[in-house]
Image: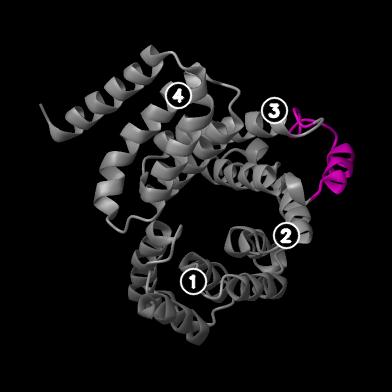
Amino acid sequence: MMPDSQSLVRSLLLVTLLIQAGCASIISSATSGFTESLGQSILDNPDLEMVRDGAPSFLLLMDGLLAQNPDNVKLLMQSSQLNSAYAAAFVIDPDRARLLNDKALSEAERAVCLSLKDACDLRTRKFSEYEAWLDKQTRKSVPELYQLGSAWAGWIQANSEDFAAIAELGRVKALMQRLAALDESYDHGGPQLYLGVFETLLPPGMGGRPEVGRKHFERAVELSNGEYLMTKVMFASQYARLVFDEELHNQLLSEVLAANPAVPGLTLINTVAQLQAEELLESADAYF
């Protein structure tokens, strides 16, 4: 039996034992804490190969737990986050990426629907009504809304050849703008990072606003104290390359490579960021 198969069997056995235990309290409270701790350990692990090979078993474990308790908002949020992160960091095949991002978005939608008032049809209601709903949200709604926005953005990227998917980008941008107003520091400046990306998707002649995007990127770096290395990678790849600023591009990526990636909650993504920074630097001469 291959090691991956052994890991899968162990995870499936664990799911079976949890289910057979029959304790609703284990599934609803202790399990949430267990999966949260395990998910945190994945995000803090710098060994990309270990995470890549082991994470699918954990995702299957999450599926089993959710099958027994489909209305557990914490589990839905954790599963959505980890499916999105795994797809972004490790999945190259477009079909697999779409499947994982479909799942992540569906789970985030369900978590929002269950936890927030009048929030079950945000992707389909009239845009004016959607904006009015966003305006009513408070700081308490930030965690659920941020996960929805993150999963939504990942889903659009995974379906970037579908014009219907791209048409939903305006809703995600409006969501992130509201989040930036409520708590711009959330997830190490995540709302500002997303807004920077949205403003630099296109060159100025096609509607992009790179200088507005630069301000968002700079604010995101400031909010994370420079510890969220993916912000600088995106700053370089999205803005510096768009405006052909080679000096800024190389400065940002050099800072990423010189930084210590070990930051609680960011170690995995920082390690991925450093690998991407190396690739971008290696291709800089050809690009510029």
Dot 4: element: helix
- Frontmost residue, 98 versus 287: 98
Residue topped by disc 1? 227
Occupied quadrant, residue 119: top right
Q: Is residue 101 visible?
A: no
Disc 2, disc 3: CB below 8 Å? no
Q: Could you tell me which residue is drawn at 75 percent across and 47 percent down?
A: 140
- Mark 1 or mark 3: whose residue is earlier in sequence: 3
Badge 3 is on which residue?
114
Type of amino acid at the residue the image marks with label 3? Leu
Query: Front-most of 83 and 283?
Result: 83
Identify the residue shown where x is 45% and y is 47%.
85
Asked whether, in this view, residue 145 is left or right of residue 159, the answer is right
Quadrant placement of the C terminus: bottom left
255 or 248, which is in the foreground? 255
N-terminal of the pair, mark 2 or mark 4, is: 4
Q: CA distance from mark 4 to mark 1?
A: 33 Å
| Residue wearing tag 4 | 65
Which of pointers 2 and 1 lies earlier in the amino acid sequence?
2
Calculate the distance from the C-alpha at mark 4 to the C-alpha at mark 3. Answer: 17 Å
Return the residue at label 2: 183
Q: Would you call the spot at circle 1 few (<14 residues within 10 Å), some (14-19), or many (20 or more)?
A: many
Q: Nearer the viewer, mark 4 or mark 1?
A: 4
Q: Is residue 12 above or below residue 185?
A: above
- Stretch in magenta: 119-138
Q: Amino acid at mark 1?
A: Glu
* Amino acid, disc 2: Asp
